[in-house]
Image (cartoon, rainbow, N blue to C red):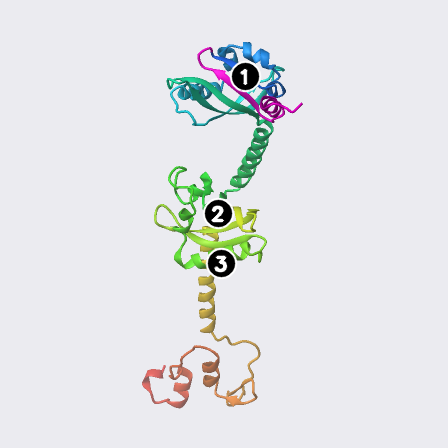
């Protein structure tokens, strides 16, 4: 015999991944609960139908119960067709908790009064555990990196939403709630002279020319000064059409290093300037014992004055020593004893 529509519907509901239900508002009991609920929570449909509403709520984790009660109360005055959604922990018959996603809407009677809730429940325990493992992994990663003094950023390159860590903001003098999670916070603070190169390096990474994005640029701080930042990042997720989706990275404060480099360049420039102005006499200087001329590197004999002038910055002032004055000008009284 061909199956009736009712048999077909029952077969679909009983083999679904979700448990379906209909709860009567006036009697506060389940009118229908698919057998799938037994696979999810361990209770049979008959047991759940006999369980009072307070008993059902007692199975909800105490930390999730206030939100469940609030949404249920809110739905009492809601409009038909609106879908309500909850995620909460429900105590399995064996004593452990399972995470449930509960989606329901309300049905009103002919007078417009809410008469029942119709919904479905799905087991999302594995998803919640995966999310928790990911959260813990990212927390450890964030702690490890921020422990080194670097700030973190996590950028959705499609929406331009960016997570800036607390340390990232502190580096620029801001508290955790003073900056919005948007790329414009970084874009508006980068020094105009550095922006083009930063975006060029970012594009080179996106195009696969570099394994990581790395750039040094200045960012505007809260006090109006600029701070030098070493910016590193990497694409870790791509869209289906091959475009960057998620990019994560770090900001390191390299202001002291940049200041030291600038001071070093100034020192080198000053030293080169000083050396260019110094001519040093060294080595063996051959001087004639009679005429006192000196032989240069090419073998020519020159006056000592000329040689010294060419090899140093010394200037000469001509005068006569006392011995020569006595010898050549004996009549000058100034040199007589």
The tag on residue 306 is none
**Among numbered discs 3 and 2, the one appearing first in the sequence:** 2
Task: Residue at 45%, 27% (x, y): give it.
Answer: 83
With respect to residue 133, does 183 lie above or below? below
Pick whichever, 199 or 119, lies toward us. 119
**Residue 220 or residue 248, whichever sits in front:** 248
Q: Residues within 10 Å of mark 2 (few under 14, many from 20)?
A: few
Label 3, label 2: how far apart the Cα atoms are: 18 Å
Q: Which residue is mark 3?
A: 200
- The range drawn in magenta is 1-27
Q: Nearer the viewer, residue 214 or 16?
A: 16
In front: label 3 or label 1 = 1
- Of callouts 1 and 2, the N-terminal one: 1
> Does 146 appear above or below 325?
above
Could you say which disc has been placed on residue 158 in the image? 2
Which type of secondary structure does the marked residue at label 3 adopt? helix
Relative height, residue 291 to residue 89 (above, below)? below
């Amino acid at each position: 015999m061909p199956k009736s529509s009712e048999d077909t519907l029952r077969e679909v509901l009983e083999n679904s991944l979700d448990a379906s239900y209909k709860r009567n508002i006036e009697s506060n009991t389940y009118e229908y609960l698919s057998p799938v609920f037994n696979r999810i929570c361990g209770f049979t449909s008959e047991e759940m139908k006999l369980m009072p509403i307070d008993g059902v709520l007692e199975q909800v984790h105490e930390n999730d119960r206030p939100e469940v009660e609030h949404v249920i109360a809110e739905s009492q005055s809601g409009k038909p067709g609106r879908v309500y959604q909850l995620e909460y922990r429900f105590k399995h018959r064996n004593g452990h908790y399972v995470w449930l996603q509960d989606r329901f809407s309300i049905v009103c009677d002919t007078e417009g009064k809410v008469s029942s809730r119709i919904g479905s429940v799905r087991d999302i325990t594995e998803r919640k555990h995966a999310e928790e493992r990911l959260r813990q992994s990212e927390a450890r990663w964030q702690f490890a990196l921020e422990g080194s003094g670097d700030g973190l950023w996590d950028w959705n390159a499609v929406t331009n939403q960016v997570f800036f860590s607390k340390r990232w903001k502190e580096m620029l003098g801001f508290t955790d709630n003073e900056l919005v999670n948007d790329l414009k916070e970084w874009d508006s603070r980068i020094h105009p002279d550095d922006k083009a190169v930063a975006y060029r390096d970012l594009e080179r990474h996106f195009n696969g020319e570099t394994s990581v994005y790395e750039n040094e640029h200045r960012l505007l701080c809260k006090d109006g000064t600029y701070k030098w930042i070493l910016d590193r990042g990497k694409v870790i997720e791509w869209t289906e059409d091959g475009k960057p989706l998620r990019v994560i990275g770090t900001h390191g404060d390299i202001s002291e290093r940049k200041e030291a480099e600038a001071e070093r360049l100034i020192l080198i420039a000053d030293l080169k300037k000083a050396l260019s102005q110094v001519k040093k006499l060294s080595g063996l200087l051959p001087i004639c014992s009679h005429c006192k001329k000196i032989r240069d590197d090419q073998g020519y004999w020159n006056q000592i004055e000329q040689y010294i002038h060419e090899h140093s910055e010394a200037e000469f002032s001509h005068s006569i020593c006392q011995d020569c004055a006595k010898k050549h000008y004996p009549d000058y009284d100034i040199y007589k004893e």
